[in-house]
Amino acid sequence: MMKKILIVLSCLAMTAGCANLEKHGELSTAHPHNRLPGYLASNTLPDSEALLPPPPSTGSTAFALDEDISRNSLILRDSPRWALAVQDADLAFPEVAGAFSCAMNAQITEQDTPHLYKLMRRVLSDAGHSVFKAKKRYMRARPFVVNKQPTCSPDYEKIMMKDGSYPSGHSAAGWAWALILSEISPEQADAILARGRAFGQSRVICNVHWQSDVIEGRSIGAATVARLHADSLFRSDLDAARIELETARSKGLKPARDCKAEAEALAQYPHYAPWPANK
C-alpha cells in the first residue's frame, strides 16, 4: 500500500502550503527523509516560469495531442505497468531510492550507499523547488479533472486539484536522478536514462499529468542538474557516490526488486527496459 505522501515536490516548494498540509495531517506519516533540504539556494534555482513556454491551450493542436496520449494511456489501468506507475508515484524514502536499482544493477540504500542515498534526497528537494514558479503561474488543470477518469492516487485527488499540473515535478525529479545516476554509473547510462523517461511517463499513465507536463518537467530536471554542477558540495557528494557504488558492487549487492517483472511492465507501453532481467 502506498505510503501517505502526497506530491512531495509541490509541498517542498511551498512553505506555507506544507505547513497547511501538516496541520491537516497529510504529511504526518511521510518519511522525514523527504524533507531534507536541497543543495541549491533559492536564488540559484532554475526559473521555470522564465524557461518554459505556457502549457498548451484548450482547443490547440498541442492540447489535442495531450488528450490523445492520455486516452491511449488509460487502457493500462490495473495492468502491471499501472502497478509500476503507482509505485513510481510514491516519493517516500527509502522505497523510491530503489526506482533505478534494476537499471543500475545495484541497490541504493542508506546503509550501503549513504552518499548516493543522501544525494537523491537532496536532489528531490531541488527539483521540487525548481518547478514551483511555473506551477503557480499557470495552475493547469490535471487530466483527471478534465476526463473524470480514475487516478493511481485516489486518496490525494482533492489536494492535487489545487496543485498545478504543469510542469510535472515527478518528471523533473526522475529525469534529474537519471542524469546524475548515468554520470555515476556510465556503463548503465542507456538503461538509467530509459528508466528516467519511464518514471516521468508513469505520471501520464496515472492520469495525473499531461504529456506536455512530463516533457517540460524533464526540461526543468535537466536545468536543475546543470545548476547543481556549479555547487561544490554536490560535486563532492557525486564523487563519493561513485566510490561507494563501486564498493557496493564489489560486494555483489544486487537489486532487491523483481527486475524481471519490472522489465515486463515497462515493455507494455511506452518505454522498454534494456537491462538484463534477473531471474
Image: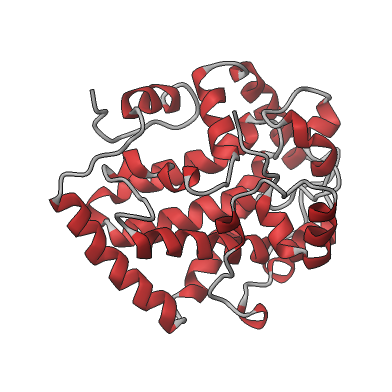
> Could you tell me if residue 229 is visible in this image?
yes
Tally of numbered discs? 0
Query: Is 153 left or right of 176, judged from the image as shown?
Result: right
Residue 216 position, x and y percent, is 63, 54
Q: Quadrant of the N terminus?
A: top right
Q: Residue at x 64, y 22 (%)?
A: 72
> Could you tell me if residue 218 is visible in this image?
no
Q: Quadrant of the C terminus?
A: top left
Residue 194 position, x and y percent, is 40, 42
Q: Residue at x 18, y 58 (%)?
A: 247
- Given residues 41 and 130, the one toward you in this image is 41
- Given residues 240 and 270, the one toward you in this image is 240
Residue 277 position, x and y percent, is 27, 28
> Where is 45 relative to 216, above or below?
below
Query: Is 219 left or right of 254, judged from the image as shown?
Result: right
Q: Residue at x 76, y 39 (%)?
A: 63
